[in-house]
Image (cartoon, coloured by chain):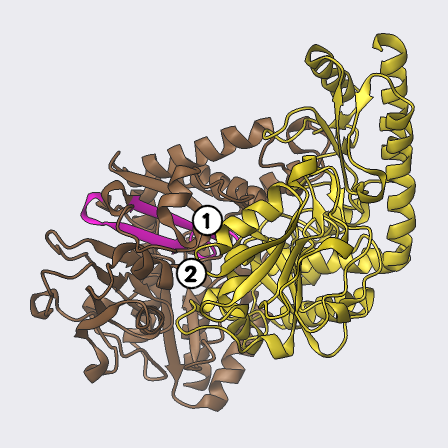
Chain colours: A brown, B yellow
Amino acid sequence: MGERAYNFGAGPAMMPDPVIERIAREWQDFDGGGYSALELGHRSEPFADILARAKADLRELLAIPDSHHVLFLHGGATPHFAMVPLNLAREGQSADYIHTGYWSDKAMAEAAPLANVRIAASAAASEFDRVPDAANWQLDPQAAYVHICANETIGGVEFADYPDTGSVPLVADMSSNILSRPLDVSRFGLIYAGAQKNIGPAGLAIVIVRDDLLHRARAAVPSMMSYARHVEWDSMYNTPAAFMIWVAGLVFEHVKKAGGVAAMQRENAAKSTLIYNVLDGSKLYTNRIQKGSRSRMNIPFFLREPRLETRFLDGARRRGLINLKGHRAVGGVRASLYNAMPLDGARALADYMTEFERRYG
Amino acid sequence: MGERAYNFGAGPAMMPDPVIERIAREWQDFDGGGYSALELGHRSEPFADILARAKADLRELLAIPDSHHVLFLHGGATPHFAMVPLNLAREGQSADYIHTGYWSDKAMAEAAPLANVRIAASAAASEFDRVPDAANWQLDPQAAYVHICANETIGGVEFADYPDTGSVPLVADMSSNILSRPLDVSRFGLIYAGAQKNIGPAGLAIVIVRDDLLHRARAAVPSMMSYARHVEWDSMYNTPAAFMIWVAGLVFEHVKKAGGVAAMQRENAAKSTLIYNVLDGSKLYTNRIQKGSRSRMNIPFFLREPRLETRFLDGARRRGLINLKGHRAVGGVRASLYNAMPLDGARALADYMTEFERRYG
């Protein structure tokens, strides 16, 4: 076996070693049942337990109140760009969006034919270098909801804290920072998150939805796009991704053992600080995000010359620091530091950056 | 490791041993890259190749003509119950459905708010003991499409061959019999199939769609429900289930090596014949499906007394014949014999059935 690399990919991302090892142990004989973990049936005896435990552990990790349901759905976060307006906005009702970059833009574009999308605040004028100050948001008190992207993976912009939107439900795409720090779920109407970053493999989404929002859908929402339908069927309206849900549950167990989301918060602060410290002291690397809006999860940066970027990425790969290439929409370099990235991985990257600058800067 | 069981579950189902073993080998170090197969990034160099190869192998296996696109989508077959009318039926246009049991019923119920659903033929009068004779279907030549469920997993009813619907596109849910026999794809407008039966793990769907059907969608179809959008993005509109697509590709390779779908057809005929022969000669077991409509994939049967069913299932489990319990909607026993079930598994079940009848019949 080759040495385990530090995988800085933005998702599907690095997973915790103990989870990968646990799956390996049960791969060919799940729970002594004579079948592979991948063949786990959703009507089997073990699976009912797996689903219940995964929900309970997520509730415990995020202190999710009884007012909110937990769902495990197919397909990542993107379906929710449409599901949120379909389920939460009445015909003609407006919906407020906070425009912080690429992903909030995608969410708006998808909602536009389905609801009266209003941009309540935008950082476009400063080229998305910050989260717009909540004091200046132009919220509509009659809006169906306020939508935010809690962390923009491409721009590298993250909400340091979450606004109070009063009686208007706050909806957040937390695909890239869920479980990375403690959260007051009671302040949210709905949270959705693709699992392939802080949780697990691509294909799964986590939804946390407040009960009173389930019955605002307009007629004829397809069942697979109805939160109410999924709650009614406890995430089993159609065959769930049983293996993926088992894996997500293993990650929850792992995070609990590692000290919960408070421990993740400390680790993530330490990891991202290592990288930002190098950037702040550098004449070679640039990251133009305002300090209060810097993402702890995804740190995009550029080198003074594109020619050096290729050299930087090649050298990184040779050291087992992989998938550092920036998103195709912006180029450059991007270091994703999700929960499963160990502190040693961030340190290895910071050291390499310093050394590279000394040599080529 | 416990002995490998024969898994008769209806899906997530048994997978081919060589595929399970291959995944085990690459689990902790995929392609020597220092990461797990589960961490495979959809923008990584290996993945572009994996997706292209999976598509090419599926095309080769089913001789898919150039007129048709191949998609790998999230979420199994159920989303397509709504996607088919949303994409193929113009406002107010009728859509013909052939009613053969539980799953065609679900497809109709989901389509009903979205299109003018017409039942062109139904086996309800004979309690779904057959596929209605195509000679008696009342097709509307103006219909947007004709929808069939190629194999009803709960009833155990399968189309022995597929009808000619002339210029009206034929749409088939082939979740449970795709790749089980050769297929003339040119006769279909659209085929969709959840992967968790004949192909791979739960969470993935395969779609084969004729190019000229892509632009009939009414306005404001959510992107995740738009076939045109998925074709435009080559199954990468959002983060695809990269690991699952790799697994599906391994299954395609395996089927090719095993002789392709013609070999699967021979195996599946042999396996199902073993079970039907026991049923036909039995006074203990009953299956009431007409011979010409019997499913080769899912064989539901009942024992004379429910008390004996429990004993039958317990005894089967002790022999490593697992997941034989019938669907909760109908009870009884069900043997699913997808491609990955070896002939020896079907023989072990047939032998056990015979022995059980000798003892308790």
Q: Position of residue B256 (x, y in %)?
A: 85, 60
Tag 1 residue: A73
Element at label 1: strand
The image quarter in which residue B308 lies: top right
**Image: A238 above or below A13:** above
Residue at horizontal 48 percent and vertical 35 percent from the top: A51
Does residue A14 appear in this view?
A: no
Residue at horizontal 73 percent and vertical 19 percent from the top: B313
Tag 2 residue: A79
Does residue B260 appear in this view?
A: yes
Of residues A64 and B316, the one nearer the viewer is B316
Q: Are marks 1 and 2 on the same chain?
A: yes
Amino acid type, residue under disc 1 in the picture: Leu
Residue at horizontal 64 percent and vertical 40 percent from the top: B124
View extreme (left): residue: A135
Residue A273 shown left or right of residue B318 in the figure: left
Q: Position of residue B233 (x, y in %)?
A: 54, 75
The disc numbered 2 marks a residue on which chain? Answer: A
Label 1–label 2 contact, CB within 8 A: yes
Residue B18 shown left or right of residue B139 in the figure: right
Amino acid type, residue under disc 2 in the picture: Pro
Of callouts 1 and 2, which one flags the residue occurring earlier in the amino acid sequence? 1
* Residue A119 lies within the magenta run: no
Q: Tell me where the magenta segment starts and ends, as one range.
A: A186-209
Q: CA distance from mark 1 to mark 2?
A: 10 Å
Q: Quadrant of the C terminus of chain A?
A: bottom left
